[in-house]
Image (spheres, helix red, strand yellow):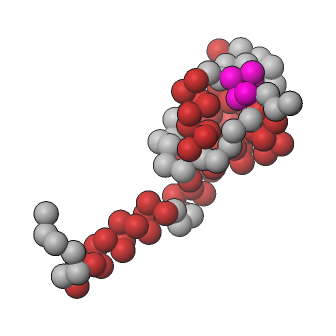
């Protein structure tokens, strides 16, 4: 039986909805992916990057309260978070590609003007 995402400490209904948009539906999937890959998938699905959301996930996967993240550990997580944001920005996404395609269609006059 698969466990819901909300069974991971610190995660609730909003996290479940965000992960579902990223195609992740169970706690087991998140645990298998790990915090960094799961968060990267959130970013790729259109979720806005948010440092607290990232370290809440990391702490939750360790079974720790979200506010347990402090000092040097928090600084190191910030470096990981910034690297994930940079990776997500460098990757093509459906929404970015869709906007580029719409701009090309507009330039060619293939869509009705709004």
Q: Is residue 67 visible?
A: yes
Residue at image x 83%, y 42%?
Answer: 32
**View extreme (right): residue:** 1
Q: Decide: is 66 above or below 110.
A: above
In what quadrant of the picture does the C terminus appear?
Answer: bottom left
Residue at image x 67%, y 19%?
Answer: 10
Q: Point out residue 72 in the picture as x, y percentages from the top left corner.
A: 71, 27
**Residue 79 lies within the magenta run:** no
Left-right relation of 38 to 52: right
**Residue 6 lies within the magenta run:** yes
Q: Point out residue 6 in the picture as x, y percentages from the top left corner.
A: 69, 23
Q: Point out residue 94 in the picture as x, y percentages from the top left corner.
A: 49, 63
Q: Is residue 81 visible?
A: no
Who is closer to the viewer here, 102 or 54? 102
Q: Decide: is 83 above or below 29.
A: below
Magenta extent: 4-8
Residue at image x 73%, y 27%?
Answer: 4
Who is closer to the viewer here, 103 or 70? 103
Q: Quadrant of residue 7?
A: top right
**View extreme (bottom): residue:** 108
Left-right relation of 113 to 87: left
């Amino acid at each position: 039986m698969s466990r819901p995402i909300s069974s991971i400490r610190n995660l609730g209904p909003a996290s479940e909805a965000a992960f579902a948009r990223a195609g992740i539906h169970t706690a087991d999937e998140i645990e298998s992916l790990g915090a960094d890959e799961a968060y990267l998938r959130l970013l790729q699905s259109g979720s806005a990057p948010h440092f607290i959301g990232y370290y809440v996930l990391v702490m939750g996967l360790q079974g720790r309260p979200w506010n347990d993240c402090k000092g040097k550990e928090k600084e190191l997580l910030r470096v990981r978070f910034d690297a994930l944001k940079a990776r997500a920005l460098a990757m093509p996404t459906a929404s970015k590609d869709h906007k580029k395609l719409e701009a090309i269609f507009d330039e060619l006059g293939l869509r009705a003007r709004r």
